[in-house]
Amino acid sequence: MPGKGKYLTHKYIIPVIFVAGSFLCFGLFLRYNLWFREQLQVFLLTFDHLQGYFTKPAFLASWIGDFLTQFFHPSWGAATVISITLLILWLLLHVLVKKTGGTKVPFLVPLLPVILCWAALTSLEYPVSNVISLCIAISFVLVYVSIRPATGRQLFGIVSIPHVYLTAGSSMWIFAAAFLIYELREKRIKGFKSLLLPLVIVAIAVGIPLILRLKYLLTPFQALTWLSEMKRNPGIWDFLPLAGVIISASVSMMVIWDKVAFKSNSLVSGFLQALVIGAVLAGGILKVYDRDLEKILRLDREAANGNWKKVYELSEEYELRNNIASYFTNMAMAKLGIMPDSLMMHYQPAATGLFIPVNANENYLTITLSNEVYWHLGDVNAAQHSAYLGTIFSPRAENSRLMKRLIEINIVNGQYAVAEKYVRILEKTMFHGNWAEDMRKYLYNEEECGRSEWIRAKRAVIPSTDLLKSGNEYVKTLRMLVQNNPANRMALDYLLCFHLLSRDIPSFESDFEKYYLPGMDAVLPRVYQEGLLINIASRRKTPADYSRFSFSPETVRQMAEYTRLFEESNGKGSVLIEKFGKTYWFYYHFARMKDE
Amino acid sequence: MFFFFLLPFSACNEEYRSVITINNYPSIFPDYKEVTIPYNIAPLNFRVKEEAERLIVKIKGKGPEHEFRFRGNKARFHQKDWEGIMKTSAGNDLEITVSVGHQDSLKVYKSFTIHVSEDKIDDYMVYRLIMPGFQNWNQMGIYLRELSSFSEETVINSRLLPGTCMNCHTFLHNDPQNMVLHLRESYGGTILYHNNVLEKLNTKAGKMFANAAFPAWHPSAKYIAFSVNRVNQVFHASGSFRAAAIDMKSDIFIYDIERNEMLTSPALSAGDNFETFPCFSADGTKLFYCSADSVQMPQKFQQARYSLCSVSFDPETGTIGSSPDTVLSAAVTGKSMSLPRVSPNGRFLMFVMADHGCFPSYNPEADLWMLDLENGNYEPLTILNSDNVESWHSWSSDGHWVVFSSRRENGLHSNPFIAYIDSNGKPHKPFLLPQEDPSFYDSFLFSYNIPELIKAPVKVRPYTIVKTARSSPAVQVSSGSGH
């Protein structure tokens, strides 16, 4: 029975390959991206939290999407949720296509929008709620096409448009398009009346968002294109899955497949369709998927777990030329105590690889990460400032990761009432509740705090003297930390490396003289040697000035050779790069600052 | 001190094995014990700070006793039940008895009293909601809350005007028919609603170094006093103080609405001094403001102490007096005064006193004080104050109620508290703005800024404000006398 075999191919093999493929793709290649996505929300299974979703369109899709996003927290949770969601979308489309176009519709038709969703989901800013909104809209279409009496069906269609908008936002356009096309296809109404219904459909579809925007307080454009709160200015890839569903539904309804000579189940046709699907998927992923971001978020994950050795190993493996990657590499080097020896072995985008600026020009990804360095340096108040801003700039002004950090900060600072507020919120979450409950023991309990190693360690480095500073005043921050706690080696290395990476040799020398004590290291770290040797080479200092520090003879010899080559080649970088590309001297001479 | 009386089965509480009478008040949030409330306030829903399967609340007023039973630890009254009680209770005390049922015992707490004032509070409150993040913002808005219910509407928010900071909403005589608010950054300008006309002003005129801020209406509705400030926000490196706002430079100007002119005088824009936070007297013949000698900023910001000053003003001619008076000197108090607000009857002036500076939101020691303008006496409003910031107070139209923001709950988020002030200026214990869910404040991450009481809803729709804000260019204010 050849027919049965083909049927089985469609019914089982495609979904199985599809689910397996998406599960592996999201589980293996987007693990860290999806893990990070979960941290950008605080989902509470409470009525009050649900009420918050009614303030914008697509309340049901957003609520279900955010509920499911919680499950991105455990390993493989995200891959499971996404692959099942995509499968549901495919099943709904498959049923719709079968119902409206019959069994001869190519399997490409229902699969194409799902592929577009797959590609879109590889972006950090495309939430799973967008897929849910497609599913809701298709479900409404399925109910609509199931109603046989024309009047009842049309009535249901008209009543459904606002409901689809309320529950699924701009996926309402799927329902409106399906409604329009299906009624045109049926052609039950003749004459003037045949024009009336399409006009009514279009008027309602356009009118409902424009009327409801007065309640939702959206601009006309926002109201007509509302997807989710995740992205304020959605781009073309955010709308392609929606457009794909409309096209699929239209194609299945408009074409009379019984009269088409196209054999959708033939081997050639199947191969061609598979080729198109593969091409769309590959093209989409290439366009949307940010591989470097995934690597950066892996560095972040390892850093969050305190695996600094792993962070450093991955940095070496990835060799990313990106300031956020450098931010983690530098933190790992400082934590491992190798920063001044290995600084120039890695890409250094000046001081932007040491700190992530916190301002309105940054996005929520970078601001979310920006507190980490302050926290590890011991500037708890700056970490707090950063964490607040990260929360403010998160999609719903909620961020479970930063809420955890704020709990830690406020416990360290003894601001228990603030910490308690955040603990109370996180306790109601599914995956952060246990962590929050564990933190509760420190609230108003100095004895318990005293027993905690991490709280003791953080409190020990809090500056004892206060200082006023503006945001992003890095040098002031670092000097304060070193002055208050000369044993804070990470702060000292950051301070000196900050000057070096800013090519500010006088400030480097001044702070080196002030805060770096002889005997701190058996041999002066490499980048400090190289920095100080610039002073000697330029005859601002003599070797005697630094006699109390131990220089490596090899570094001194290299400096002489670098100077010789530099002079001989009249400062040609191409002559020096091979041998000295990873020295501070080369950076000093040839790195271009952003404002240069 | 607890007193336990173990009782056998009680007829009215027969589901409990034991009934324990506790001679202490119940611990509830918000704390509504012994407060004075207006009869037109929304239900005072609360939660007990202990585990409870059942809550029984008995309310005894002038009429029959009402008993309410709730599941869990939250008392949430129905609007109609509450309104019924309020209707018969104006001018009387309500005796509230809270019983907490947990497992097989019922704890009956000592009754507490709520006094229901005969004086009505203005029906609405306008406030800004913003996350306490400092330096930058993302989501903020100005909202309107009906005080007799839990209904909240948006006046304007940052979704409609992305990248725009909105603040300093101010009304004349608590009437939204005359309203001013500021927009900064993306769609910057001063939004003025006056004589049923909404317009956007560019207030930077003549020698003004920035746009106008901190407005105060003249009682005639012909003028608005503004201060012009260059503010620098800085952050504390350690300790529980998170940030500070520093007044680097400030002057005061008076806007003549009809002539579209900014007026000033050397008294209000002296080069060496800071002048800020203007406020007209009730009769409009005097302008109160805060002034400090210039000190090196930001290095010596803790030495900047503002005195409360006044200068005469002739509303007929728009003439500003040339010789300012010091009403309350920082040299005498050793403290810094800010945010003067005169009561509608003109007798009292409520202000904030802090150790230094003029932006008390960042000074935990900032407290509300009252100056009797008849006799010059001033004293702290102790019952209104806490060990954290109290600031941004606003009188009701009849002068019997004030709303102010306080960070007392956790030192970070500021919440609106309402207090009754009797005819002699005596304050009564304040209460937190009630919310439908008494746990609302437990998880609400925004701060209430600048709560203002008004008599009617703001009639201007958000989209009208948006349209005006986006219309460019704004009406340019010209420089008048004194520039």
Image (cartoon, rainbow, N blue to C red):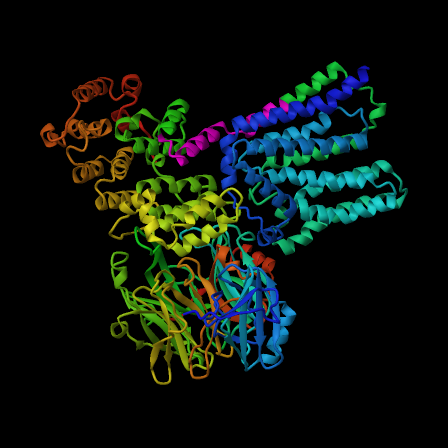
| Residue A201: quadrant of the picture | top right
Q: Position of residue A203 (x, y in %)?
A: 75, 48
Q: Position of residue A39 (x, y in %)?
A: 49, 41
Q: Position of residue A280 (x, y in %)?
A: 63, 24
Observer-nearest residue: B322 or B138?
B138
In the rendered structure, does residue A297 fall within the stretch colored magenta?
yes
Picture residue at 80% right of the left edge, 32% below the top: A99
Residue extending farthest to the left is A544
Observer-nearest residue: A589 or B73?
B73
Q: In this view, does B296 lie above or below A96?
A: below
Horizontally, residue A415 falls left or right of residue A546, namely right
Observer-nearest residue: A465 or B13?
B13
- Residue A169 visible in this rendered orientation of the protein: yes
Q: Is residue A180 above or below residue B151?
A: above
In the rendered structure, does residue A409 fall within the stretch colored magenta?
no
- Residue B483 visible in this rendered orientation of the protein: no
Picture residue at 59% right of the left edge, 24% below the top: A283
Q: In this view, does A226 lie above or below A344?
A: below
Stretch of the chain drawn in magenta: A279-308
